Image (tube, rainbow, N blue to C red):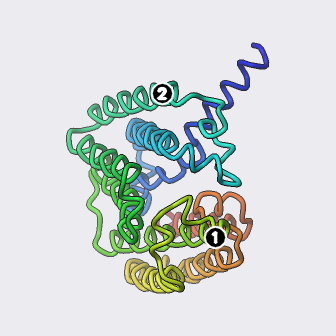
């Protein structure tokens, strides 16, 4: 394998944004929280749904990168993306996106018809988000939130588990919280150039994103507490949730970026808190 081939493969992997696949672990939340994750064959049952959403999300990211390539080329970090940097042509990237989407829809159909409908809803919203909705203030936040909610519902469908009201609300508000932090992080990092990169940032009045982040952060703490309060062992995870929310707010306000995935992977305290949360919930649900 030549050096050129290695560079092309590296650019292709980067194009798919595999680090963002962490979001698709949301599909396993229903069986994990429901105490069913360790049932024989259940993890194997989750392979097709997980791969399906990974390919669908990668397809959406590619389409978004194609449409945003001129803006990304002027961004201090996004200019290194494969399409913006010229490492992969828009036509080649589109071919990869179509292939990912086709395989994704086939795998979704193999799971169930309802699961495929949920995935289609995710694809449609993601596409319209890339084309227009990301330019609309508040609407862009709800579009991002819908991605998390659809993953949660898809997980419930794939594993035949009902989603409780408090879990739905917790995920919805957490997604709005994280989306707001991401937009605020962009506004801080880009400064006066923020509007040139993302039009919706021009429409948010000063203090609106901060206020929304504080409001939804507090609401998440309330809904999550309501969700775990009847599960006595899980109530001790509330302080971890509180710490994680405050740490993310501090990170955004300090100008360290608001991307949820990057924050989790690059911020040691957030990573440790997330790991401890998973261990404590696992012990609370499965330890008894």
SS for callout 2: helix
Residue at which label 1 appears: 192
Residue 218, relative to residue 64: is it above or below? Answer: below
- Disc with the residue nearer the chain's start (1 vs 2): 2
Residue at image x 46%, y 86%?
Answer: 215
- Residue 26 x %, y %: 44, 55
Residue at which label 2 appears: 96
Other-residue count near label 2 (Cα within 10 Å), few / some / many at <14 / 14–19 / ≥20: some
Quarter where residue 60 is shown:
top left
Residue 163, relative to residue 6: is it above or below? Answer: below
Contact, mark 1 vs mark 2 (Cβ under 8 Å): no
Can residue 40 be seen here? The reply is: no
Q: Looking at this view, name the residue that lies furthest to the right.
A: 3
Separation (CA) of disc 1 from disc 2: 34 Å
> Nearer the observer, disc 1 or disc 2?
1
Asked whether, in this view, residue 194 is left or right of residue 171, the answer is right
- Residue 128 x %, y %: 33, 50
Residue at image x 41%, y 48%?
Answer: 39
The image's mark for residue 152 is none
- Residue 19 x %, y %: 60, 47
- Residue 229 x %, y %: 41, 83
Residue 160, relative to residue 162: is it above or below? Answer: above
């Amino acid at each position: 394998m030549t050096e050129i081939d290695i560079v092309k493969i590296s650019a292709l992997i980067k194009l798919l944004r595999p680090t963002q696949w962490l979001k698709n672990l949301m599909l396993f939340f229903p069986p994990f929280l429901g105490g069913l994750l360790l049932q024989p064959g259940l993890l194997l049952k989750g392979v097709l749904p997980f791969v399906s959403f990974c390919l669908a999300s990668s397809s959406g990211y590619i389409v978004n990168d194609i449409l945003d390539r001129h803006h990304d080329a002027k961004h201090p970090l996004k200019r290194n993306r494969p399409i913006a940097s010229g490492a992969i042509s828009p036509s080649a990237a589109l071919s990869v996106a179509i292939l990912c989407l086709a395989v994704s829809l086939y795998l979704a159909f193999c799971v169930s018809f309802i699961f495929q409908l949920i995935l289609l809803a995710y694809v449609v919203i993601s596409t319209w988000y890339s084309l227009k909705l990301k330019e609309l203030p508040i609407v862009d936040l709800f579009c991002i939130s819908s991605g998390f909610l659809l993953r949660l519902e898809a997980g419930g469908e794939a594993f035949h588990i009902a989603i409780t009201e408090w879990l739905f609300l917790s995920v919805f508000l957490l997604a709005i919280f994280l989306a707001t932090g991401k937009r605020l992080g962009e506004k801080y990092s880009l400064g006066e150039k923020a509007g040139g990169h993302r039009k919706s940032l021009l429409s948010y009045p000063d203090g609106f994103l901060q206020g929304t982040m504080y409001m939804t952060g507090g609401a998440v703490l309330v809904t999550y507490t309501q969700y775990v309060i009847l599960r006595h062992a899980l109530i001790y995870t509330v302080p971890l949730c509180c710490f994680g929310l405050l740490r993310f707010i501090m990170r955004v306000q300090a100008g360290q970026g608001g991307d949820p995935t990057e924050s989790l992977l690059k911020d040691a305290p957030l990573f440790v808190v997330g790991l401890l949360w998973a261990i404590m919930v696992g012990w609370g649900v499965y330890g008894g």
